[in-house]
Amino acid sequence: MEIPKLNKLHGKLTIPGDKSISHRAVMFGALAQGTTRITHFLEGADCLSTISCFQAMGIHIQKNKDEVLVEGKGLHGLQAPLDILDVGNSGTTTRLISGILAGQDFTSRLTGDASICQRPMGRIITPLSLMGAQITSQNQNGCAPLTIQGGHLHGIHYQSPVASAQVKSCVLLAGMYADAPTSVTEPVLSRNHTELMLNYFGAQVTSKGTTAFILPQPDLKARYITVPGDISSAAYFIAAGLLVPGSEILLCNVGINPTRDGLLHVCQAMGGDITLLNVRNDGEPTADLLIKSSSLHGTEIKGEIIPTLIDEIPMIAVMAAFAEGTTVIRDAAELKVKESDRIQVMTDNLTRMGADVEALPDGMIIHGGKPLHGATIDSHKDHRIAMSFAVAGGICEGSLTITDGECVNISYPEFYTDLYSLL
Ligand SMILES: O=C(O)C1=C[C@@H](OP(=O)(O)O)[C@@H](O)[C@H](O)C1
Ligand SMILES: C=C(OP(=O)(O)O)C(=O)O
């Protein structure tokens, strides 16, 4: 698809619901007693995969516009699925549901698309096996398709080698079914939506530094959940608002949980004019973000901030290419195992546009300020790549096209409509 040019963005946008929180609301709702009502649910393909997996296990889930009703059947109410569970393109669905399936007294199988079947699942197979589940990777490559034979689980302390909320959440969910307390320590704190929401559903979860603890759980209680706007989706508008001269946009109801807000700190360090308005906390902190175009300069991004902006790095790399000076991104090797190898794919595509970018094993060095021109961008069917280059293509000289641009439906089906509504 060919990307239209952006100039002087103005207006107001309500950002669609957070993907991580939407997944969790459905999952925890399915395991709770009673009906969980979820508003501002994200109707992206990934969250719809989560819904269909739980429907396949006998959970009644009703969708009316952006509200979802989940009729929970309790921690032990899931039925054995008749068929293989299809997680689509969603790593979050795969890893979190595996923790739940490990606690069931039935055997289940799950698979997904070509990308999912190449993403590493050894990181959840290891702790779940230590807890007593039996998990096999059909192709013996540590990836899906997986067969999960659940059963009697033991509480463990798990030292995760990666800072991953998906791994942490998988172990905590399995921990609800264990015979003793379970804890997970990660090298750097990752997003804490599972800890916050499980607590809200009545589970006994505590956190100390980079360790989260959970007690075996008798039951969860159905709740009412309003999903905040997804800061990872807001990222494209934040970048566009800062980069497109003469812009001023207001992004309403964006989640600013400190385990997710690294992008705001990086934009400010790059000279971006972002004002937080109407800050509130309804379980998850949110704010309206006022973005004004700014002249950006390079920065260094590494260490503890990385998990708080991991999905925003493709967009940050584009901003860095337009900014003056050098940006260095380190400690982000996790980018290689997302929907695509985001270090390589960003480097290749930015280079095609004339940027000066060097791929590192754990990040990128971007010498910004070179004139960028149009190109054919290969999205690798990765939604974050497509959205980042829709912004880049709107600003560069000449025409830019993106292959498989419709992959934005994974996390943001209305992305193009929303972007061009600000013209
Ligand atoms: O827990 C979650 O909802 C997510 C955690 C992150 O993955 P990792 O836990 O693999 O870092 C992130 O990249 C993904 O988009 C969503
Ligand atoms: C990595 C992502 O999601 P997931 O791991 O759920 O596929 C993402 O949305 O950028």
Image (cartoon, rainbow, N blue to C red):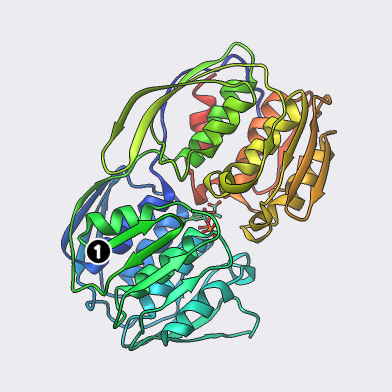
Q: In the figure, is residue 174 to the left or right of 87?
A: left
Which residue is rendered at x = 62% and y = 47% of the image?
A: 303
The residue tagged with tag 1: helix, strand or loop? loop
Which residue is rendered at x = 50% and y = 41% of the image?
A: 232
234 or 170, which lies in front?
170
Q: In the figure, is residue 302 to the left or right of 72?
A: right
Residue 110 on image: x %, y %: 47, 77
Q: Quadrant of the C terminus?
A: top right
Judge whether 368 appears above or below 230 on screen.
above
Crowding near the residue tagged with mark 1, few <14, some 14–19, many ≥20 C-alpha atoms within 10 Å: some
Residue 202 on image: x %, y %: 20, 60
Q: Quadrant of the N terminus?
A: top right
Which residue is rendered at x = 43% and y = 86% of the image?
A: 133
- Hey, which quadrant is residue 85 in on the image? bottom left
The residue that disc 1 covers is 204
Judge whether 52 appears above or below 368 on screen.
below
Q: In the figure, is residue 88 to the left or right of 73?
A: right
Residue 408 on image: x %, y %: 55, 46
- Hey, which quadrant is residue 29 in on the image? bottom left
124 or 299, which lies in front?
299
Amino acid tagged 1? Gln
